[in-house]
Image (spheres, rainbow, N blue to C red):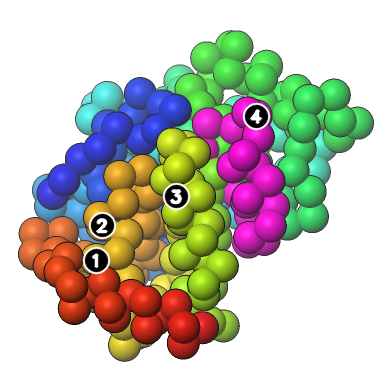
Amino acid sequence: MEYLLLSNTNCMVSHSAFSIDSLKNINTEEGVSLLRKAYEGGINFYHTSDETLKTKEMLGYAFYGMRKEVFFSITSSALDNISLQQQIIQTLDGLNSNYIDIFSIHNNNFVPKKGSTDGLYTALLSAKADENIKHIGFSTNNLELAKEALISDLYDIVLLEYDFSQQGLTKNDFDFIETAQNQQKGVIINFNHSVFSHNKFSLIFGFLHKSENIIPMWNIENQEELQQILFFESNPPQIDEKFLEEIENLKEEN
């Protein structure tokens, strides 16, 4: 497993991250077992959203006594500062931790900014000042908003939620990734579960694996998918002329 320092943070994370929202429908014991196997395989970066306390507690159980060995990313869909503050407290309790490595506000309509009436960004800054969160992120399904957050100086991390069931990576997506490389900002791409059945999965994995500050996040549901990720981490596709040609063809397809 390769590790990299996620840009704008002090987080030395595995090149593949594990989004555990995919585990919310299985029992806690099975989820904890899969998380521990992921850690044994070298994955030290884990993500979940504010939708359920169950997955946060899963992380707390799986890595009890190991807090400094792992990194947690949390997204919140709160629409006001009071709700956001309550979710941060709930998250800390669920994780059995006194801090969150990366806390991102999720929004598909606008990028929260300093001084906005919703108070979201101010609440993030306050939580960071209190050391409840280490780094501030913005999460969205909207590529244009992701670009806006990326070029701003407001967020340490941009997390793009990507639905592979609707489309593969488009030319605009590739352009966004290249912009992220040039900006030297940390970007996380959270792929939904359908990416595992995509016929160009190995090509997509290889393209992201060669990126220095792009972290792919996989919604792993079972042992087989975990082993697939660990295999490609140990045996990444060779970046040669043929590979680069296939990437260009993939851009043109979409």
Horizontally, is 247 left or right of 110 in the view? left
Answer with the quarter of the image where residue 4 lies: top left
Earlier sequence position, callout 3 versus callout 4: 4
Q: Residue 208 in magenta?
A: no
Closer mark to the observer between disc 2 and disc 3: 2
What's the mark number on residue 206?
1
Three-letter code for the amino acid on which mark 2 is drawn: His
Callout 3–callout 1 Cβ contact below 8 Å = no
Where residue 131 appears, as percent x and y from the top left, is 52, 14
Q: Which mark is residue 209?
A: 2
Q: What whole-number distance in Å separates the C-alpha atoms at marks 3 and 4?
A: 16 Å
How many C-alpha atoms fall within 10 Å of the one at disc 1: few (<14), some, or many (≥20)?
some
Answer with the quarter of the image where residue 70 lies. top left
Give the residue at mark 3: 188
Task: Identify which residue, 59 or 122, lies in the foreground.
Answer: 122
Question: Magenta part of the protein: which range?
Answer: 139-157
**How far across and how far down the image is residue 116, in percent?**
86, 30
Residue 154 disc label: 4
Please name the amino acid that badge 1 sits on. Gly
